[in-house]
Amino acid sequence: MLLSQECYKKIDRELAKYPADQRQSAVMAALAHAQVELGWLSPETMKEIADYIRMPAIAVQEVATFYNMYNLKPIGKHKITVCTNLPCALSGGVKAAEHLKAKLGIDFRGTTDDGEFTLMEGECMGACGDAPVLLVNNHRMCSFMSNDKIDSLVEELKK
């Protein structure tokens, strides 16, 4: 077993939200819980989830590869996703991304040598009016990110 009993309890809570014949509806939440616990989703983890939810392993893999919030390989301790969709790009998203690339010394999909940061490019995060927007570890939205705010965020995450 790759996942802890605590993770399975969380998945069970997700499964309880759906009729027994629609267990597959909990797959996204199950993947998210597994990723929080393990940091990324290996093929073995996806297979374990598939077996538990009772759906084909390829269907779980299709979900995990379709959405960019799932990590299919090990990443840094902190994943920073920069929205570069057109509205954000025009409102400073590209400049924010360039600042982060220079500050961290990595490009998109790269991880710093110390394993602290992975930088990702993201599509619409639903906050165009707050651009530039960053998402930290898929859970924390940061809005109106000037270079100074980016520098402060990176320092905060290093601690």
Image (tube, rainbow, N blue to C red):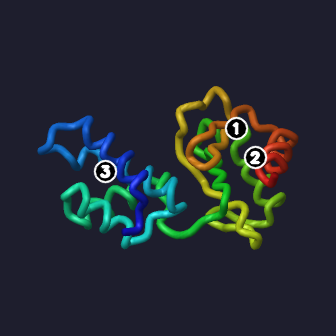
Q: Position of residue 82 (x, y in %)?
A: 65, 48
Q: Identify the residue at horizontal 85%, vertical 43% (top origin).
A: 152
Task: From the image, tell me which residue sits under label 2.
Answer: 96
Q: Position of residue 81 (x, y in %)?
A: 62, 50
Amino acid carrying mark 3 in the image: Val
Towards the viewer: 40 or 62: 40
Instruction: Describe residue 15's horizontal placement relative to residue 118 as left or right.
Output: left
Task: From the image, tell me which residue sits under label 1.
Answer: 132
Q: Which is more foreground, mark 1 or mark 3?
A: 3
Q: Identify the residue at horizontal 67%, vertical 29% (top origin).
A: 130
Towards the viewer: 155 or 97: 155
Q: Residue furthest front?
A: 5
Res 27 label = 3
Q: CA distance from mark 1 to mark 3?
A: 31 Å
Reply above or below: 54 against 152.
Answer: below
Q: Position of residue 148 (x, y in %)?
A: 87, 41
Q: Identify the residue at horizontal 80%, vertical 54% (top origin).
A: 158
Q: CA distance from mark 2 to mark 3?
A: 33 Å
Label 3, secondary structure: give it: helix
- Residue 113 occupies quadrant: bottom right
Q: CA distance from mark 2 to mark 1?
A: 7 Å
Reply above or below: 5 against 45.
Answer: above
Label 3 crowd (10 A; few <14 / some 14-19 / many >=20): many
Instruction: Describe residue 17's horizontal placement relative to residue 138 as left or right.
Output: left
Label 1, secondary structure: give it: loop
Instruction: Describe residue 30's horizontal placement relative to residue 113 as left or right.
Output: left
Amino acid carrying mark 2 in the image: Ala
Label 2 crowd (10 A; few <14 / some 14-19 / many >=20): many
